[in-house]
Image: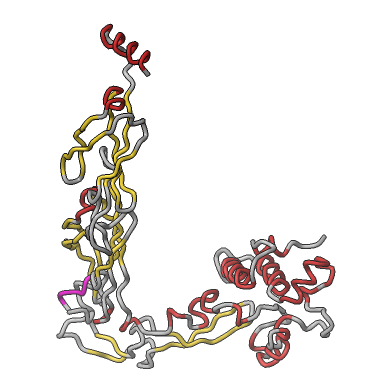
Amino acid sequence: MSKDYYNILGVSKSATQQEIKKAFRKKAHEYHPDKKTGDEAKFKEINEAYQVLGNETKRKQYDQFGTAFNGATGNSGRGGQGGFSDAGFNWQDFARQAGSQSGFGGYRTNVNFEDFDLGDIFGDFFGGRSQSRTRSNQSGSDLEYQLDISLRESAFGAEKKINIKKLETCPNCSGKGYESSAKIITCPQCNGRGRIISSQRTIFGSFQTETICPTCQGQGKKPDKFCPKCHGQGRVETAKQLDIKIPAGINNGESIKISGQGEAGIKGASSGDLFITFRIKPDPKFRRKGYDIISQQEINIAQAALGDKIKVETLDGYGTLKIPSGTESGKVFKISGKGTEKLHGRGRGDHLVEIIVKTPKSLSRKAKRLLEQLKQEI
């Protein structure tokens, strides 16, 4: 039965090469045998699908003939080598160089190393991004905070206090991880090298890799005793109160950045940033749309028919709105400059008043007679 390579990778038949590559990377990461979610058979199947769909020529053949053309195994007139050789990389040469110590044992796969970041799949094994620098110069993490504000606060701005918990530089050791009385000694685990060599077996064989020493974090030296307050981390969790200035005109879901108010960096590295996202609470009288404020105002039949001057509430208080005769329900009137302040510009939005003509449910005899007379006149 012909395999559905598009379904295996979870992409549509109209997917671009970039979308196919992205889907392959995601699934290869998920099903790699060394992962907890790994599945060797599924991993092979994903790789087989990518070797076809990731190659424009093979993809065209597959779209026309299905898997009958045997493109997944590379049998396209090149001696069945396909796979890496199609991408300028010969798997057989690689396996021969690795020799018996590599533990490949004849296992063959067509994964193209250029198609994904090996650090994403094998983590520390290939010395991924997490191993590219020591913890001694690692910047602090950014923090996110959601702040609920009123519609009026979003319109005109305000100041609020917030309480957050974050990692701050240890006040006892000033972030060093040890007190001044401690002695600095050569790290016993790496013997001062700052890095250690470890071995790991994968489906590609056994490899040796050099990684940062977890004891000294790549420094080669360590104190004979750590700071009793932070236990050598250089940072402690602290509750902190911050004064936040809400920008006038900020809208629902928008954020501001407060530089340096994230978590402290390690051993003197720069702190992260604090991102505050605002959520506007529902208001019983007003609704916001962009920089405009919308409200509803009820009038009776007589006011709608004859016209009137009515009192309406805005963000600035009460004002007067002239209702012309013959106003219908749903009519919207604009009061210029009574909306919210504009975040990135001058001036304000408008206040839009929607008129709702209220029909009475019960009438007095006199009112009925007047309406009957009105009906005759109209």
Quadrant in the picture for residue 258: bottom left
**Residue 169 is a magenta residue:** yes
Q: Residue at x 68, y 91 (%)?
A: 99
Q: For residue 113, what is the image quadrant?
A: bottom right
The reply, left or right, for residue 172 in relation to residue 132 is left
Quadrant showing the C terminus: top left
**Residue 176 to residue 297: above or below:** below
User: How was the colour assigned to the protein in this rendering?
Assistant: secondary structure
Which of 171/221 is in front? 171
Q: Does 18 appear above or below 362?
A: below
Range of magenta residues:
167-172
* Residue lying at 64% horizontally and 77% vertically, measured from the top left: 203
The total number of labels drawn is 0
Question: On the picture, is 73 further left or further right than 324?
Answer: right
Q: From the viewer's perspective, is 44 left or right of 180? A: right
Q: Position of residue 46 (x, y in %)?
A: 67, 68
Front one among 136 and 196: 136
